[in-house]
Image: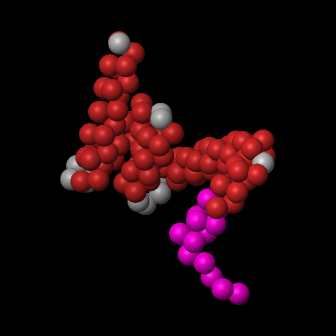
């Protein structure tokens, strides 16, 4: 059996999506909804797993805190993301990716605040 790369797999999925959209618009919409649901469920499961690692005193809390901050940022929960990235920066003050993420989260929070005021 031939192995395919992640890029080839993603390309195949995209081609299936395009074919379905052209030939079966109703089915394409249902498929897209199912994909979105699966992504959200997968993200939630990942967050639960990382949280359990954090609660169990896992050895690499800096990695867990960074991953949780990224996951919450991607899901749009900026307050939770900020809490985890701040924890990361307390654990590892020189964490450059954490400092970068902290800045991005703060900018996104400020943008949201400005949008609410407008």
Above or below, comparing residue 1 to residue 64 in the picture: below
- The one nearer the camera, 72 or 35, is 35
Quadrant location of the C terminus in the rendered image: top left
Q: Quadrant of residue 16?
A: bottom right
Q: Provide the residue span drawn in magenta.
A: 1-14
- Residue 58 in view: yes
Residue drawn at 42 percent across, 44 percent down: 69
Please tell me whether the stretch drawn in magenta is mainly helix, strand or loop.
Answer: helix
Whole-percent x, y for residue 100 in the image: 26, 47
Residue drawn at 58 percent across, 65 percent down: 11
- Residue extending furthest left? 94
Residue drawn at 30 percent across, 49 percent down: 98
Question: Is residue 111 rendered to the left or right of residue 47?
Answer: left
* Count of numbered tags: 0
Q: Quadrant of residue 5?
A: bottom right
Asked if the stretch drawn in magenta spans residue 104, the answer is: no
Color scheme of the displayed model = secondary structure
Question: Is residue 105 rendered to the left or right of residue 40?
Answer: left
- The one nearer the camera, 58 or 38, is 38
Residue drawn at 31 percent across, 26 percent down: 110
Whole-percent x, y for residue 44 in the image: 60, 44
Whole-percent x, y for residue 20 in the image: 73, 53
């Amino acid at each position: 059996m031939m192995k395919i790369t992640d890029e080839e797999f993603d390309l195949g999925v995209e081609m299936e999506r395009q074919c379905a959209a052209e030939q079966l618009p109703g089915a394409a919409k249902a498929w897209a909804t199912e994909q979105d649901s699966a992504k959200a469920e997968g993200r939630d499961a990942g967050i639960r797993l990382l949280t359990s690692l954090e609660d169990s005193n896992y050895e690499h809390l800096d990695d867990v805190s960074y991953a949780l901050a990224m996951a919450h940022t991607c899901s749009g929960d900026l307050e939770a993301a900020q809490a985890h990235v701040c924890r990361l920066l307390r654990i590892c003050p020189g964490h450059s990716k954490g400092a970068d993420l902290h800045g991005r989260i703060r900018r996104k929070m400020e943008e949201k605040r400005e949008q609410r005021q407008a």
